[in-house]
Image (tube, rainbow, N blue to C red):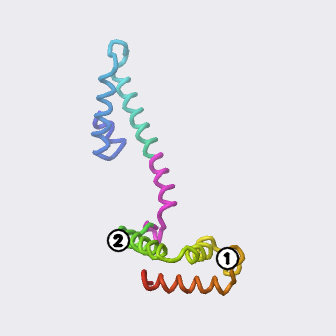
Amino acid sequence: MRRFFSIRTRASVDVEDLMQDLFLKVQRVDSDTIENPSAYLYRLASNLLLDRLRARRRSEARDAVWRSVSHTTVDGADIADSPDAEAAADARLRLERLTQALAELPPRTQQVFWLHKFDGLTHAQTAERLGISRSAVEKHMTRTLQHLLVKVGR
């Protein structure tokens, strides 16, 4: 059986796994009801090979989908789109400092900054929404950006 598997898989790791799987399957079978044990054994081995092939194809398809979503390919080499651990930790620290710096501002200034930067409103739209002048929005934004530059940096 080892030779049967090794000819078909060409990988010694797979052969050992298949031999173990085959042993477990044979151990659970009632041998009294089998008319041709040799044919039955080869049928079990063939089915195990087919199961392994199907599982590998599913795994490769799943990996290909994952790779297409989370990686970029440059000159045939996969490059991860996600930042490395150091960059991610640095970004978290910068975000924490930014959040703390924004919390130090007066509520109206925070509101102006939020509407303009996160909700994407123009200065005129922000002024209209809050019932203040456009120059007041500009002053709030200038104050916020200066404060963030001092507290967080570039």
In-image side of 109 versus 41 (left or right): right
In-image side of 2 versus 132 (left or right): left
Q: Residue at x 49, y 75 (%)?
A: 102
Q: Nearer the viewer, residue 99 or 72?
A: 99
Residue 30 covered by magenta stretch: no
Residue 63 covered by magenta stretch: yes
Mark closer to the observer (1, 2): 1
Instruction: Return the residue found at the far top.
Output: 32
Q: Nearer the viewer, residue 50 or 59?
A: 59
Is residue 82 placed above or below 9 in the rendered structure? Answer: below
Q: Nearer the viewer, residue 106 or 59?
A: 106
Q: Which residue is mark 2?
A: 86
Q: Residues within 10 Å of mark 1 (few under 14, many from 20)?
A: many
Q: Which residue is mark 1?
A: 126
Calculate the distance from the C-alpha at mark 1 to the C-alpha at mark 2: 37 Å
Q: Which residues are magenta?
A: 57-81
**Quadrant of the snapshot with the N terminus:** top left
Q: Residue 56 location, x and y as percent?
A: 43, 45
- Looking at the rendered structure, the kind of residue marked 1 is Thr
Dividing the picture into quadrants, the one containing residue 136 is bottom right
